[in-house]
Amino acid sequence: MYYLDNAATTQVLRGAADCALDCMTNNYGNPSSLHLMGLAAEEVLDKSRRELACVLKCKPCELYFTSSATESNNTAVFGAALRNEPKRKKIVTSRIEHPSVNTAVNELEKRGYDVVKVDPKNGGYRACDFVDAVDKDTALVSVMYVNNETGLVLPVEEIAKGVRAKNPDTLIHIDGVQAFCKYDISVKDLGADMFSVSAHKIHGPKGIGALYLKEGLKIPSLIYGGGQERNFRSGTESVPLIAAFGYAVNQMNKIRKEAFLHVLEINKYLKRELANIKGIEINSGDNASPYILNFSVAGIPSEVMLHYLEGCGIYLSSGSACSKGKKSGILPILGYSKEREESSLRVSFSYDTKKEAADALLTHLNRGIKDIIV
Ligand code: PLP
């Protein structure tokens, strides 16, 4: 079996799973309890928070655990909007955001916000187009670091710098899910007010994420209750998942540079070989993260080839599926034809991807093209 769908999710590290198990069966106290077991559970939260802070280069007190990056993104978008009501009612974002930002801003648009979705130019994004869209009424600029379908890297630092210079009151949120533990990130140097991450893209478990909120920034909560996470995100903290998240962050950060180079090598190899196969066109440009490679197979619908490859033990994604095959429309936004979108596939790598997986993919793609087309 060859798993080439790491942008969708990753295998949980054994050590991370062990941490979770320990917090379920042994160290199972509630961090809000005042006794020793409560304190031990609280120490688990603190440790994981420190691990994340170390990687994002911020203070532990600037991080809040959430149920997912979807929740982090929703909290950032709605929080920035509500904080400014009724003063600033404009939101600027890109046209290629993940649905957890895109549908959140659509909801704000329905409620009367002025939402500007910046279009790409020549298959990429320019910081000046975001800055131009910002005015005195802009509450938030929300932009992703790495696009999850093509790997396109957006100029987030330049965007934040330009926006800050134009309107210092505009908040900047970065969806960092596909960049976290892959790029060297300093939320301060990036100029982010808010930054979202998720555990299951970095070999941690599903159902746990975090939101960086710059020290001193106050935005309204989405979830009210017992006042956990310093009164910002109520609900008993998922200590097992948070323990596993901290472990995964620490491990993945330790191997970040070598993993990046390893993935880059496989990506370059696969890209080169794919270019030699008749009918294959690459949809990830030179400005893409090496972790994601999107391509189209002319004349073969994504799902047909995806299931053919599945039959050969190769697991990847349809190149522009947002959920269960529904097309996201992002490839046409980036300038590719509808036909190219309909036949697109996404492979996504991780530190444990072997060159053998790329070779198996090439062999079966070649066979598939012959078998399916005739
Ligand atoms: N943002 C991006 C760029 C993503 O790729 C994803 C997951 O696919 C998310 C947000 C949502 O993350 P989660 O699955 O933790 O809700």
Image (cartoon, grey):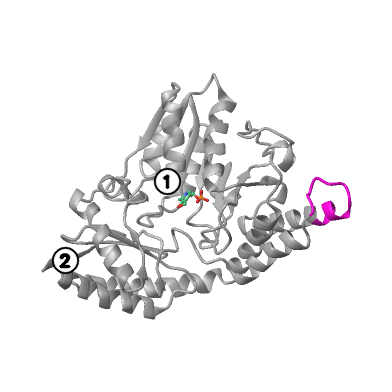
Residue 192 horizontal side relative to residue 284, left or right: right
Q: Nearer the viewer, residue 199 or 206?
A: 206
User: Quick one: 161 or 99, which is closer to the camera?
Assistant: 99
Do tag 2 and tag 1 residues touch (Cβ < 8 Å)? no
Q: Is mark 1 within 8 Å of ligand 1?
A: yes
* Amino acid carrying mark 1 in the image: His
Residue 107 in sight in this render = yes
Residue beneath label 2, please?
279
Where residue 289 appears, as percent x and y from the top left, is 41, 61
Please report the bounds of the magenta region as a residue range.
Answer: 29-40
The x, y position of residue 269, in whole percent, is 33, 76
Q: Name the side, left or right, on which 268 lies relative to 141.
A: left
Instruction: Residue 266: give x, y in percent of width and height.
Output: 38, 74
Residue at image x 26%, y 78%?
363
Residue depicted at 51% across the width and 23% down the height? 88
Give the position of the N terminus as an image quadrant.
bottom left
Furthest residue toward right: 35
Local crowd size for mark 2, using a 10 Å CA cut-off: few (<14), some (14–19), many (≥20): few
Toward the left, the furthest residue is 374
Q: CA distance from mark 2 to mark 1?
A: 29 Å
State which quadrant residue 349 falls in. Answer: bottom left
The structure residue drawn at horizontal position 24% and vertical position 52%, both measured from the top left corner, is 341
Q: Is residue 217 inside the magenta stretch?
A: no
Please determine whether, in this image, residue 8 is positioned above or below residue 372. above
Q: Can residue 134 be seen in the rendering of this structure?
A: no
Check residue 157 in the rendering and tell me which mark sits there, or answer none.
none
For residue 98, the mark is 1
Judge left or right: residue 123 versus residue 153. Answer: left
> For numbered disc 2, what is the local secondary structure?
loop
